[in-house]
Amino acid sequence: MSNRPFVIDFLHAGGIHLSQYDHHIVRKLSSLRGQFLDQEIYEAMLRAQDPILYEVYEVKGAEVAGELIHGITIIHPGKVGTEYFMTKGHYHLLLDTAEVYYCLQGQGSMVMETPEGDWAVEPLRPQSTLYVPPRWAHRTVNTSPSEDLVIFFVYPGNAGHDYGTIEKQGYRKLVVERDGKPEIIDNLRWLPPEKR
Ligand code: F6R
Ligand code: ZN
């Protein structure tokens, strides 16, 4: 991306317009193995097909302190059993780096936790801004039955990503559908830091 100032119209003519990005990540169901509560349903779904759960369009400068990486994540609607489609989620490798999300479209939740086991789940709705402080792992969940969740994000160029810590046991809290509505439940696989 240019080191001259530039403007990108992510929202264009009432829709999402994605012509200017330099990094496109496509994550399918198969890349979230072990993360969904109902592993039997997960495996059965995967045998039938491997749908795209979400896509990330990044505008990426150099991955160095002082730069900001930004872009759009689109999480499609759907569920594995009762659990909504979601991102893998991660800590930043440089733990002391924050991130800002701005919701453009849809309905969802951000599931967050710290290495000490503190947790938070915050709503994402159009025109809401969510601040993820340094040290908080974050995962985005699409809780709409039918609509894409579209979010803008911006984070420090040198943040990096640690997926491995979350992959081991998932997040402390899960977001599932109960009686047609999102509900936060405990992840029974999750252990507090002193018991790992
Ligand atoms: C970057 C960030 C987002 C996510 C994106 C996909 O630090 O938090 O851009 O990378 O929403 O989620 P992951 O990276 O967890 O697959
Ligand atoms: Zn992040």
Image (cartoon, rainbow, N blue to C red):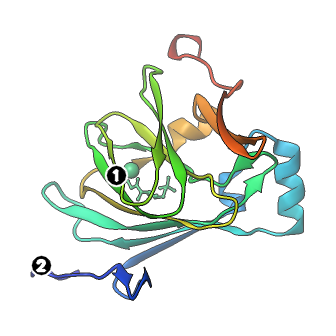
Q: Quadrant of the C terminus?
A: top right
Residue at the left extreme? 4
Secondary structure category for the residue under label 1: loop
Disc 2 residue type? Asn
Percent across and percent down for residue 66 are 12, 57
Q: Nearer the viewer, mark 2 or mark 1?
A: 2
Q: What residue is at 64 percent from the left and 36 percent from the top? A: 174
Q: Quadrant of residue 59?
A: bottom left
Q: Is 23 displayed left or right of 106 in the figure?
A: left
Percent across and percent down for residue 142 are 59, 55
Q: Is 136 displayed left or right of 73 in the figure?
A: left
Percent across and percent down for residue 163 are 50, 46
Q: Quadrant of residue 93?
A: top left
Give whichever of 145, 24 is nearer the camera: 145
Q: Is mark 2 within 8 Å of ligand 1?
A: no
Q: What residue is at 25 percent from the left and 37 percent from the top? A: 96
Q: Circle 1 is placed at which residue position?
A: 160
Q: Is 153 displayed left or right of 142 in the figure?
A: left
Secondary structure category for the residue under label 2: loop
